Amino acid sequence: MGVLMSRRQTVEQVQKVSLAVSAFKDGLRERPAAKRPAEGAASRRGTLEEHAVQELRDEEEAPGGSRTPSAAWARLRDGRGVEPEDLDRPGCFSPPALVRPVRPPREEEERLEISLEQREQVTNDEMCEVCEVWTADSLLPCRVCTKVYHDGCLQRMGLLSPAEASEAIEAAHSAVGWSCYHCDNLNSLLTEEEMGSLSDAFQQSNIAPKSSLSLEDFLRYKGLGGQPSSKEEKERQSLQFGALDPRQKGHITWMDFLSHESLLLLQRTRTQEGLLHLLTGKERERAREAFLALNQQGDGLISQDQSRHSQHAWFRKRHPGTASSSASASQAEPVSEGNSQKQEDKKLPGEEPGEASRTVTWPAFLRESTVYILAARPNSAAIHLKPSM
């Protein structure tokens, strides 16, 4: 296994372990070998120092006290603690209960300002969020938050099937990225009150949870099935259904439908400034990169067409035919100057003769893009909020 540590961190960690080992050895020499600390090992957490030192202490206290290097010494030498599969902590592998957020006061929502010039240095955690073990090259970093996970820990929690493990690992270490189980669930952004409102709407429309929806079910829920409605509105909702069904199976999954409706509810109940509070440091930094890549003149302005296309660029999906299609993820990648600007110009709608393109500032760009940045979080291949051009 590799180790995700800098040289300075490695030196500090080795020094810390050496001090701990010396302290335990000194204490063992001063007490009879028969006296063992009561329940010392049972109360210790699965961190590098505690597990390795505990094994060393047990070895010292064993009859005949062998002084030969043990597995604990080997792990200390290699800079590794107890492996996740060696942990005996069944309680930590129970998925945590969802705690819904509390909406901040409206006056606080209006105060948030995000600077274009002030870049954010966001670093991933070093230990697995589940087992708290400090290793290794198998950690899966979330592209939305700073948490990292072992694929084995996610499997033991029932949040990742063995068949999906290799695909999740590939996605996590690709340019597309991978969202952890919490960031992947857009419904977790809703407060208790907002979720209650959404549940009432499902019940009134006879939408059964955990069921897939056909186009007829989707239009009926939108109030368009069998009812007089504009042709444009039906076409718009049909296009959104197609975006939620990228493989054209004729139905959308419950989780994709729930994420889509959660986003629409957030748009209705939150201001644009309020939605900004939901962005993470990684998402804000990628938004800066996208804006700066488009702001070629350096004047802090981009065109409206560029802003609209950037909203589409948040949804970089893997091709459904690839081997990793089930683990495909959307990625908010900055629009690079070198590899995609010429292609983008071909895709953008042309301006009408004599029509002046509206310029967009950084604050306006971020406010208008926030809901699409959030919609790009799920690992699903579906586009949960299709931008309009």
Image: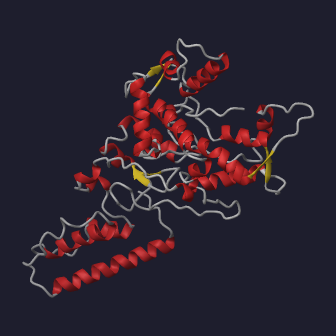
Q: Is 91 placed left or right of 331 in the picture?
A: left
- Residue at x 56%, y 24% (from the top left corner): 241
**Residue 235: x percent and y percent?**
64, 19
Image quarter hosting the C terminus: top right
As drawn, the residue found furthest toward the left would be 34
As drawn, the residue found furthest toward the bottom would be 30
**Residue 5: x percent and y percent?**
47, 66
Q: Is residue 73 above or below residue 3?
A: below
Looking at the image, which is closer to me, 344 or 356?
A: 356
Q: Is 85 placed left or right of 374 in the picture?
A: left
As drawn, the residue found furthest toward the top would be 226
Looking at the image, which is closer to me, 175 or 335?
A: 335
- Residue at x 9%, y 83% (from the top left corner): 32
Image quarter hosting the N terminus: bottom left
Quadrant of res 147: bottom left
Q: How is the image coloured?
A: secondary structure
Work out whether residue 375 can be spotted: no
Q: Is residue 60 above or below residue 320?
A: below
- Residue at x 18%, y 72% (from the top left corner): 59
**Residue 358: x percent and y percent?**
82, 43
Quadrant of res 343: top right
Looking at the image, which is closer to me, 309 or 329?
A: 309
Q: Is residue 237 above or below residue 327?
A: above
Q: Is residue 234 above or below residue 138?
A: above
